[in-house]
Amino acid sequence: MSDSLPDPKRSRAILIGVDSTPRHPGLTPLPTVRNNVADLAAVLTDPDVWGLDAANCVVPSNVADARKLASTLERVAGEATDTLVVYFAGHGLPDTDDGELILAVGDMTDESPKFTGLRYAWVREAVRRAPARRLIVVLDCCFSGRALHTMSDPASVVAGQLEIDGTYVLTSSPRNSPSMAPPGARHTAFTGSLVEVLGQGIADGPERLRMTDIYDRVLRDMVIGGFPRPQQLGTNRVGHLELVRNRAWQSPPPPPPPVRRPAPSKPARPAVFDEIAETTAAIRRSIGTAHGDDVLRITGGGPLQDLAEAMRRQFGDGAKTAALLTGEILSEAVREVESGAEPAALLRDLERCVAGLRRPLSAMATPVHTAAGLETVLRTALGHDEVAATTAAAIHRAGPGNVEVGLATGGTPRMELTSRLTFTSKLIAPNAAATPVILDDPVVLLSETKDVDTRSIGRAATPRERRPLLVVAPWIAPYLVKRLMFLAAQVVVIFPAQAPVAAATLAGLAKLTGTGVGDARPGRAHRVLVTASTTTVMAGNAPELADTGRAVVRVEPAVVPIAVRALAIASAVSNGGVVPGAGTALSAVRTHLAGDGPAGRILHRSLGSPCLEIMRNTHTRADAVPPAIGDPLATVEGGLRHAIATVARFLTRHG
């Protein structure tokens, strides 16, 4: 795969902004959303940034009807062969029954959001089927609304659904909080920073920006502004590919001669520094001594709460290490500023040094190929054997981007496998339904001829059950369709559009749904998604998982936060493998900081602290850490990112 910029001719962007939902009074208007979409379209089509053709940057005018919007999304996704960007700004909320993420549209109602809103499952399917080699989803929305009746934290359920296999996903706020816009601002805080980074570039940044470069700067802006921290998922492949030109890039000038500045008088330290010092001291005493939900105990307030929450949501672990690093780096940085260092220059050097550590850290990483290896990492981080084993098994069967967390009514954690078959199809009846249709738990009838067995219809659809019905047949008599309309909750008749593979498709559907072609005994599916040109059939608890299948880790409500953490840790492992754990990797890379001036001194002193404190608390030597104990590379890098962003907030104010 080439690292060249995306081809604007073969790329597409669809920018969806929903500023009001009048039929859902519980969701407040978002007047800045229209500006979000307009200005983001302007920078993406700017030839100095990306140069996407205006015709290839689609801004739907109708954002009221979810099915029409989904149809537009499917069309745009199908046209992209190089890069696909999907952006949504508006409200998001989990369904109150099963936690499925729903993106609010203009006509969504308070009574039935699941059937009137834009289901994230539709977005995921459209993106998964896109032929583009770069897939990017950006969500600028909250995950709020009515809490699940079985859960106090709906954001936890949503967090377990966001990742899409092979896709870079960037979200504005992983928390159950509204999408924020400063008073009188033109944009929401997140999109405003995104537009600024894309439109103005990053001074001292590379000539071409990757999504991870953009994320780092947006993260810093959000932390400095006191807004919720954005979250990125799926960084291993797409996130490291170059995306746009850096408008602020220029050839590096020769370094200026050193200037000796007189040491200024020491300014008064803000009281917030004392709070950080107190929290850091408490972490020093406890880090490495417990696992499980111990990560939550440092989120009880103070300046490090947002950092800890972000680490827990994005990586599932590493909150204490990131908070300890923040305290150590900030303390050392303030000492350097009080000795004459210029805060803005020091911050730039810190960011440069941290960026330089990514290569040696990556060189230390080893992939985790087995379920047993992943289970060991999860058990060490979580302390919950059943969740660790179930999540590792699900990841091993379905792949890291194809697992989500779902609710169960009780019992131990269990894995459900959902196989799926997607094929091009033509809609036979109802012939006017040219927009996506979802059939939940439908009955399925298969026929390769026009003679659909009427006995099958009688068994499949009864007035008492009124289940949705999918008929796969080349034709069906109109009188039978009318009869079915009275017997089934929904009726859709389709047939494979490609005649040469119709027989093979029917055979695959038969295996998937547990019936036969022309069999009088109907089959069952977990869910069916029918669009104007394709049909996706999913079978729950499939004994054999198809290539494009998904797995669901089902747990009772109280265990959902732990299961979501497990999924986040597993995702981090898949995005780069693991490095030596217990802080030893951070301690080891300090040798690469020699000669880097004040910033190098700060990091050299600070990066050894987690390992030192863990060894002290556990009465262990660094060379005695078991090889099986490893930390995900993505978590270690993420901890550094969030620590530097937090230091930037306070160092900027201190300067």
Image (tube, rainbow, N blue to C red):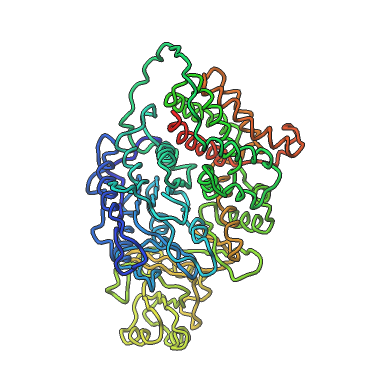
In front: 279, or 11?
A: 279
Image label count = 0
Q: Residue furthest right?
A: 619
Say which quadrant the C terminus sits in: top left
Q: Is residue 153 above or below residue 650?
A: below
In percent of the image, x 31 and y 62: which residue is there?
71
The residue under the point 36% across, 80% down is 450
Q: Classify residue 101 as left or right of residue 309.
A: left
| Residue closest to the eye, 103 or 181 | 181
Is residue 372 visible in the rendered structure shown here? Answer: no
List x then y, in percent, for residue 137.
39, 50
Q: Is residue 466 above or below residue 314?
A: below
* Image location of residue 436, percent across then percent down: 34, 67
Residue 498: quarter of image: bottom left
Point out residue 638 in the picture as x, y percentages from the top left corner: 52, 40
Q: Is residue 460 visible?
A: yes
Tell me which corner region of the image, top left, top right, bottom left or bottom right, holds residue 275. top right
Q: Quadrant of the N terminus?
A: top left
Q: Is residue 546 left or right of residue 435?
A: right
Classify residue 102 by image quadrant: bottom left
Q: Position of residue 195 (x, y in %)?
A: 31, 42
Report the front residue among 555 and 439.
Answer: 555
